[in-house]
Image (cartoon, grey):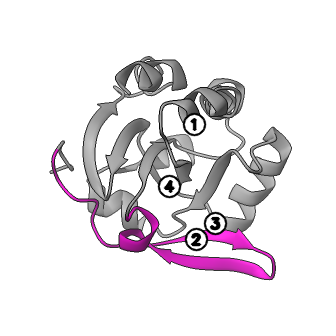
C-alpha cells in the first residue's frame, strides 16, 4: 500500500551531505512548516534522471519559488555522497536539495520501493513527484514503470 493524498509523510531518516559528511534528517522535521516539492527517481547519474528529471527542477527553481515553494527535494535510493556528487555535476546547489535514502527506508514507508534487480539496480524507488504542505501530501503523481510523463517539473508547477 502506498501513501495517498491527505496523509502525513511517514517517519524516516534520510541523509544530506553536510560540510563534514552525511547529516541525518528526520522527515518530520524536514517537511515541517514548509511547502515542498519532492520528486524521486530510480538512481543518480542514470539517463532519464540526468537528462530530464533533475535538470527540469533545477531550471524551474525560480518558478517554484514564485509559487511559494520553500524547498525542492530530489530523493533517490543512493547514499549522500553519490547524491551530493550528482547534484554538483548537475548544478543543483542552492536550488534542489539532494537527499539520499540509502537504505530505502523512506521509499519503503511510502510504498514506493521496488525490486529492480533484473536491471542490476537492486531495490530502488519508483519515479514520482509530490507536493507536501507542512508534512501532508497535497498532490501525488506516480509514474507507470519506465515512464516519465507526470512527475516532471512543468507538470508539478501546473499543480501549484
The label nearer to you, 3 versus 1, is 1
Tell whether position 142 is magenta: no
Tags 4 and 1 touching, CB below 8 Å: no
N-terminal of the pair, mark 2 or mark 4, is 2
Tags 4 and 3 touching, CB below 8 Å: no
Question: Secondary structure under badge 1?
Answer: helix
Q: Distance from label 4 to label 1 (Cα)? A: 35 Å
Is residue 13 positioned above or below 81 on the image?
A: below
Q: Distance from label 3 to label 1 (Cα)? A: 27 Å
Q: Residue at x 63, y 26 (%)?
A: 56
Q: Distance from label 4 to label 3 (Cα)? A: 14 Å
Q: Which residue is identified by label 2?
A: 15
Residue 147 in sight from this viewpoint? no
Residue 50 at x, y percent in the picture: 70, 33
Q: Which residue is identified by label 3?
A: 79
Q: Distance from label 2 to label 1 (Cα)? A: 23 Å
The label nearer to you, 4 versus 3, is 3
83 left or right, relative to 29: right
Check the image and name the residue furthest to the bottom. Answer: 20
The label nearer to you, 4 versus 1, is 1
Residue 44 at x, y percent in the picture: 66, 46
Amino acid at each position: 500500500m502506498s501513501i495517498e493524498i491527505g496523509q502525513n509523510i511517514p517517519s524516516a531518516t534520510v541523509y544530506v551531505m553536510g560540510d563534514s559528511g552525511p547529516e541525518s534528517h528526520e522527515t518530520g522535521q524536514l517537511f515541517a512548516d514548509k511547502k515542498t516539492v519532492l520528486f524521486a527517481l530510480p538512481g543518480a547519474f542514470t539517463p532519464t534522471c540526468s537528462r530530464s528529471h533533475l535538470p527540469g527542477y533545477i531550471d524551474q527553481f525560480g518558478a517554484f519559488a514564485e509559487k511559494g515553494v520553500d524547498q525542492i527535494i530530489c530523493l533517490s535510493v543512493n547514499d549522500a555522497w553519490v547524491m551530493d556528487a550528482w547534484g554538483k555535476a548537475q548544478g543543483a546547489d542552492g536550488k534542489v536539495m539532494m537527499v539520499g535514502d540509502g537504505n530505502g527506508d523512506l521509499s519503503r514507508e511510502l510504498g514506493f520501493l521496488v525490486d529492480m534487480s533484473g536491471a542490476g539496480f537492486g531495490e530502488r524507488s519508483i519515479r514520482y513527484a509530490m507536493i507536501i504542505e507542512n508534512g501532508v501530501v497535497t498532490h501525488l503523481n506516480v509514474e507507470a514503470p519506465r515512464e516519465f510523463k507526470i512527475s516532471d517539473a512543468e507538470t508539478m508547477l501546473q499543480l501549484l
